[in-house]
Amino acid sequence: MADPSSYRPRPGEIPDSPGVYRFRDEHRRVIYVGKAKSLRQRLANYFQDLANLHPRTRTMVTTAASVEWTVVSTEVEALQLEYSWIKEYDPRFNVKYRDDKSYPYLAVTMNEEFPRVQVMRGQKKKGVRYFGPYGHAWAIRDTVDLLLRVFPVRTCSAGVFKNAARTGRPCLLGYIGKCSAPCVGRITPDDHWDLADEFCDFMAGRTGTYLRRLERQMAEAAEDMEYERAARLRDDIGALKKAMEKSAVVLADATDADLIAVAEDELEAAVQIFHVRGGRVRGQRGWVTDKVEEITTGALVEHALQQLYGEESGDTVPKEVLVPALPDPVEPVQQWLTERRGSGVSLRIPQRGDKKALMETVQRNAQQALVLHKTKRASDLTTRSRALEEIAEALDLDSAPLRIECYDISHLQGDDVVASMVVFEDGLARKSEYRRFQIKGFEGQDDVRSMHEVITRRFRRYLAEKEKTGEWADGEGLTDGDRHANGVDGAGGGGAADDTAALTDGPALKDDDGRPKRFAYPPQLVVVDGGQPQVAAAQRALDELGIDDIAVCGLAKRLEEVWLPREDDPVVLPRTSEGLYLLQRVRDEAHRFAITYQRAKRAKRFRSSPLDDVPGLGETRKQALIKHFGSVKKLRSATIDQICEVPGIGRKTAETVAVALARATPAAPAVNTATGEIMDDDDGAPETTADAPGEPVSAGTPDERRGQER
């Protein structure tokens, strides 16, 4: 690694003007390209104390061996030069979007004497008009098949066209009226070119003109009693409308716009683009990138705009581009887009209405694309094996951790404190082994103490199951207190029981009914969501139980550092490490499972009722009672005979309900603090229970509550 001070420019060398800079490594390869409004201020940020730099930026400046720059006149020129150099040098530390598939386009070769309609992929060619991209090639063919009866443009290959011209016989499409047969001279080159131009106008969204013209011609044919011609025109109109239905109207004002959404995590980002023309979605594409530098959402949007419009010009750049965050500064990017189009381009964040609603749809697609990308990587056996080997090497384990358990604590401002345990085997989630815990040893918010309790309870159960299998030597075993220690608070959780028998090593690890025991299978690695304090608490719990053959680590969210017990410095895995990616997946899954349980537990407490404690009273009869009396308050004051009047409620059940309600303590009445008057509840108002007297169902807005959750 190079020391950045060894190639730092001398004071006063760097100009205070817009420009583009390049970092090169010891082999003179360009590893990073950037632009700046002030080269002096921007480059100075790279040569500060390494401890203050982001880990990714620190790696870049220590890999580099020199820096050079080029001064330009304006920020727009800097943007253009940055794009050119990124395309030319392909620097390893720059954001580079990659298509998650090769999207097909509907292309019209307007650069030929007889333009042809076809499906095209790959690099765009000059003189060819493109529409799309489409999700599937068959969608293009279906659309073209509907439009050919109205715009019979050539679709055949060059070989078929020449062979038809040589023989003087058109292909089948020429006989059935879906090709104007320019190969045999049925239409002149100029007329065929005009026909292809009309096809392009229709695909570009200018549909109203052709529909009105066909409807007028159909009416004229009907008046002249040319009914066969009128019927053909009617069918043509139906075909055009059917083709238009394939792309639903999403913006009522017939806007031409591109909508860009970004979904990202610490290491990767997914971009989704919807192309809207004439108010209809005409195409969609998606990119995924590795975040090899510290970058904001606005900067990700800027790079996406560069890749999307860097080779485009004219109408292919829409009048309006809607984004989730604006580049900083936005003016040079907007001016650059305007120059590419040749007229004004609006770059903004949608705030309300149809455009904001459509942006939310694009955002969901971006999120799904990121999840799908991660799932594809996770499902690759080779990738998973490499990830486990990297973890074993980084943590100095004797073997790859084939079973990993991860724990997370969740609460809302110290209330409803719960924990989760998720299990990954061979790098894949084992949802049938998930477990969830309620914190019982104390009340309040203390993540470290909670982690110690959870680890203790889980591995006490493991030791108890181990003792039952006869694996203990004479004189060893658990104390009576350990044998009666609390375990988890319920079955686990997150999915179907998939091949649970594969977890066992034989009958010794099964209950009498044949199901695998919950905690009989130990992990090779315990991961906790947190840093040094949580890791120390987990290790202390294992030490107190005498367990010394299970490794422990923690993954801290802030810088994705891996912490080990009794170590002052974290282990920093490379950002391209599959091992780090696997640890992140495990950590994120534990967090999701914990917060889902915590929210469900809190919601159940808020919805609790005295009727929940009545044995044998199901949900249907509870609803019938509330519907009949209007509230639990009125039901509490009813007699047994009155309760028996409710359909489905017998005398024995009515007596049980009356006893249960009599035992339940009603909430204290509200008091007007100004007058001292006791205020009765409304008859239809729900009553609070003794478990949560007067506690509100929610505190603050949904966004505020999410911010308070852990």
Image (cartoon, rainbow, N blue to C red):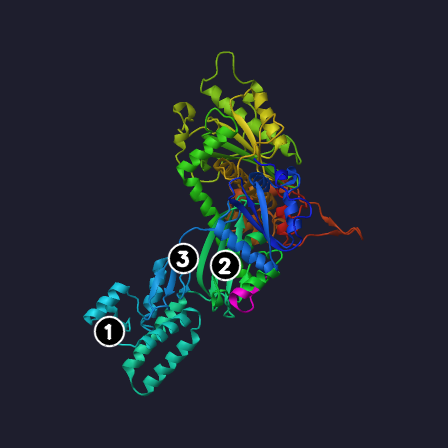
Where residue 357 sits: x, y (%)? 54, 60
Report the side of 87 relative to 635 (left or right).
left
Q: Quadrant of the C terminus?
A: top right
60 above or below 207?
above
675 above or below 495?
below
Residue range (magenta): 338-350
Mark 3 crowd level (few <14, some 14–19, many ≥20, 10 Å Cα) = few
Query: Gap in Å between the C-alphas at discs 1 and 2?
Result: 41 Å
Where residue 341 sits: x, y (%)? 51, 66
Report the side of 698 relative to 582 (left or right).
right
Which residue is painted at 29% across and 81% down in the image? 229
Query: Gap in Å between the C-alphas at discs 2 and 3?
Result: 13 Å
Earlier-in-chain disc, 3 versus 1: 3
Q: Nearer the viewer, residue 280 or 547?
A: 280
Residue underneath mark 2: 310
Provide the secondary structure element on which disc 3 rests: loop
Which residue is painted at 40% across and 76% down in the image? 211
Mark number, residue 123: 3
Earlier-in-chain disc, 1 versus 2: 1
Q: Residue 599 is drawn in which quadrant?
A: top right
Q: Nearer the viewer, residue 344 or 454?
A: 344
Q: Nearer the viewer, residue 678 or 346?
A: 346
- Label 2 is placed on what type of residue? Gly
Residue underneath mark 1: 184
Residue 356 in view (yes/no) = yes
- Label 1 is placed on what type of residue? Val
- Label 3 is placed on what type of residue? Gln
Residue most extreme to the bottom? 224
Mark 2 crowd level (few <14, some 14–19, many ≥20, 10 Å Cα) = some
Provide the secondary structure element on which disc 1 rests: helix
